[in-house]
Amino acid sequence: LRNILASAVIGIALTFFTAFHVARRLTMPLNALAGGVHKIESGDLRQRVEVTTADEVGELGEAFNRMARSLE
């Protein structure tokens, strides 16, 4: 029973750590993009975001950078 309980606690801890890491990795680029939007909104038209992926979030970052260049 102790081994099962210890395994369950370790499994829950690993699941929590993995979920936290994945959520952070997904939200960091979106937070950077939101910060860029706020800077553009306040008049800093030279604001760009770093694009590190080629997925949909990366495409959104590229679109943001193109928009910022056209506004500048």
Image (cartoon, rainbow, N blue to C red):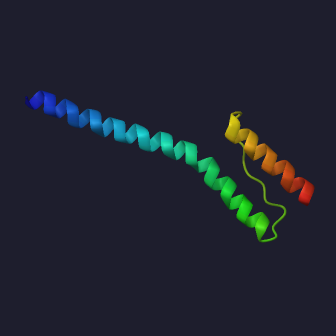
* Quarter residue 63 falls in: top right
Numbered-mark total: 0
Image quadrant in which the C terminus is located: bottom right
Q: Position of residue 26 (x, y in %)?
A: 56, 43
Spot the residue most to the left. Answer: 1
- Asked which quadrant contains residue 51, the reply is top right
Residue plotted at (49% across, 44% down) = 23
Q: Is residue 37 left or right of residue 30?
A: right
Q: Give the quadrant of the N terminus.
A: top left
**Observer able to see residue 52:** no
Q: Position of residue 24 (x, y in %)?
A: 51, 46
Q: Position of residue 30 (x, y in %)?
A: 63, 50
Visible in this render: residue 47? Answer: yes
Task: Locate residue 4: give its quadrant.
Answer: top left
Residue depicted at 90% across the width and 59% down the height? 71
**Left or right position of 72 against 19:** right
Q: Is residue 2 left or right of residue 71?
A: left
Instruction: Tell me: residue 32, above or below residue 38.
Output: above
Q: Is residue 22 left or right of residue 70?
A: left
- Residue at 86 percent across and 48 percent down: it is 66
